[in-house]
Amino acid sequence: MKRSLFTVLTFVRINTKRFFRDRLALFFTIGFPLIFLFVFGSLNNGSGNVSFNVAVINNSTSAFSKTFVQQLTDSKILKVNKDVKTIDQAKEKMTRSELDATIELPTDFGNVSPGTTYPSGVANVIYTQNNAQSATALTSILDAQFKAINGKFVTNVTPFTVTSTQLNQLSLSPFDYTFAGLLGFAIIGMGIFGPVNVFPELKKMGILRRLSTTPLRVWQYFLSTMIGQAIIGLLSLGIMFIVAVLVFHLKVVGNWFELAAFIIFGIITILGIGLALGGWAKNERQAAPLTNIIVFPMMFLSGTFFPRYLMPEWLQNISAFLPLTPIIDGIRLIATEGKHLIDLLPQIGLIGAWLVVIYFIAFRVFRWE
Amino acid sequence: MVAMIEVKDLKKRYGDKQAVDGISFTVKKGEIFGILGPNGAGKTTTLEMMETLRPIDSGTVLIDGIDVAKDPEKIKYIIGVQPQTPAFQDKTKLTEVIEMFAAAYGERVDAMQFLRDVELEEKANSYVESLSGGQKQRLSITTALVHGPKVFFLDEPTTGLDPQARRNLWGLIEKVRDRGISVIMTTHYMDEAEVLCDRIAVMDNGKIVAIDTPKNLIKQLLKRGFTKEQHVEQANLEDVFIDLTGKGLREDI
């Protein structure tokens, strides 16, 4: 037994060293998921505060209108496109949905009408059919602003008002879901695409065949791959966590050790799929189609790129049983909801069941050449 | 001399082709035994059955008294295998290749010693992809010997090498034999077989058509009245080979 483990550990040591010498492998396991993290992270960050792309066309020369436009420009809710000067330009951009709406201020906007002491006017929100929703929202935003302004000029009584209070409790942001999904994507990349690309190549070169003339056992070869992947996987996901915490303000409330243990468990399970596919395939032509059939549905249904709660319920019920789903859910539950392993018994049980099934198949179908 | 390998009535069938058709031979301890034959004669299949890589249809192979079919795991500890085209994973240092192969047998070895045996000690810290074809063959030979096997198989070891690299490799193979290891090799080069092999078996269509020392095979051919056009008194092994197996070009299998 001691000899067997020495064999495994030597393979782990040398294969891990080799991995760090291989820039392409480094890029695909560490750099590639990071790129996705930056892309999806930035997309999600914007959705925190809703903003409208608008053009402001001011036909008035009044001092009030100028101050008002300045206020709109400084507003965080509105993104004012300053290149648009005429209503025609605005129309063109609205039809292409580059603008959500246009705010037009008429010539008399902000003038003091005869018989009054305060400026007045009607702002016109212009929009196209496909932007009705944004226009409604924008109208009510402007309405609220005008109310505040009106209060300064005319005192009036407002018996009913509404205020909103933000609770300081933890809640999940879309990014929490996205991030857990991206970790799932990284695990698939390493665990499945890794062996599926490497094994047929090793078979083609006769490297596995040469190993099969030695007393090396399949389980030793698998175990050394599992340990190596767990090390590299922890490193890759660790870097993703660091970036997510520093750049995208991810709040990890769970226990790091439980998280690491759970991630290793997940990586090893998914790696089994890669070992089965790569171990079975005689060459790339056999490996690629079957891998795509298995990986892509799993990737989308398990919520790597968009959260599962967006799916219809029947689909959610099915996708809940895929091996990657409990892994992604579990990582999110530990990391952002502070759950413990003991709370995750359903997830762990499901992953464990898949682990047994997957490795049973992997050992059965493995071929040295 | 003690027989290290005993092959008896060995057979292998692929579909409707009898790849190996009941061959028998013995290999002594510490000799170089060559298997010659045109492509598709069954050389590689024979070797693969002896190396535990292919199941045996019928017949027996005993190596050092152990039945290959019955105890392949034990066999793996006493044989070393040199594949036709040695390949190693990129970004692996030569010392690491040796360490890994030794580890596959559960052993820890002095990698430098094994590199010195094949004059690769200067390359110890290079990656395998920087080696020339001949250097890869030498590395492959030394990795096949890390566990001190009793039998060493080589499949066309010098194919594609330049004359210098070939002669260098011959020297290495002779050194292996001189350590008391039985060497079994296949080759297409008659000069190689003539220089290197103590005995050879010529295979054609899955059968052994002749088995003897190169010298005796040549003598037998001359006795049958064979003459060469210009050098009446001389014939070389290539003549024996062509005489036994015909001139027709064979399709690669």
Image: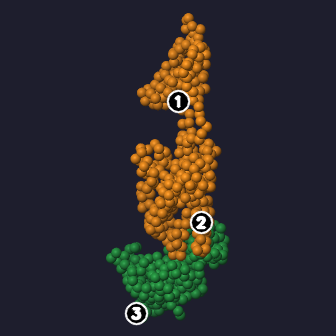
User: Considering only vertical position in the picture, is A250 above or below A50?
Assistant: below
Q: Position of residue A358 (x, y in %)?
A: 47, 62
Q: For chain B, give the colour.
A: green
Residue at point 56%, 82% (across, down): B149
Task: Give the amino acid at mark 3.
Answer: Gly
Report whether mark 3 lies on the same chain as mark 1.
no
Q: Which residue is mark 1?
A: A52
Q: Amino acid at mark 2?
A: Val
The chain under label 2 reads: A
Q: Tell me the crowding category of disc 1: few under 14, some 14 to 19, or many 20 or more residues within 10 angstroms, Cα based.
A: some
The image quarter in which residue A22 lies: bottom right
Write down the residue under mark 2: A12
Disc 3 target residue: B225
Viewport quadrant of the N terminus of chain A = bottom right
Asked if residue A149 lies left or right of residue A277, the reply is: right
* Few, some or many residues within 10 Å of mark 3 (<14, 14–19, 20+): few
Whole-number angstrom distance, CA of label 3 to CA of label 1: 102 Å
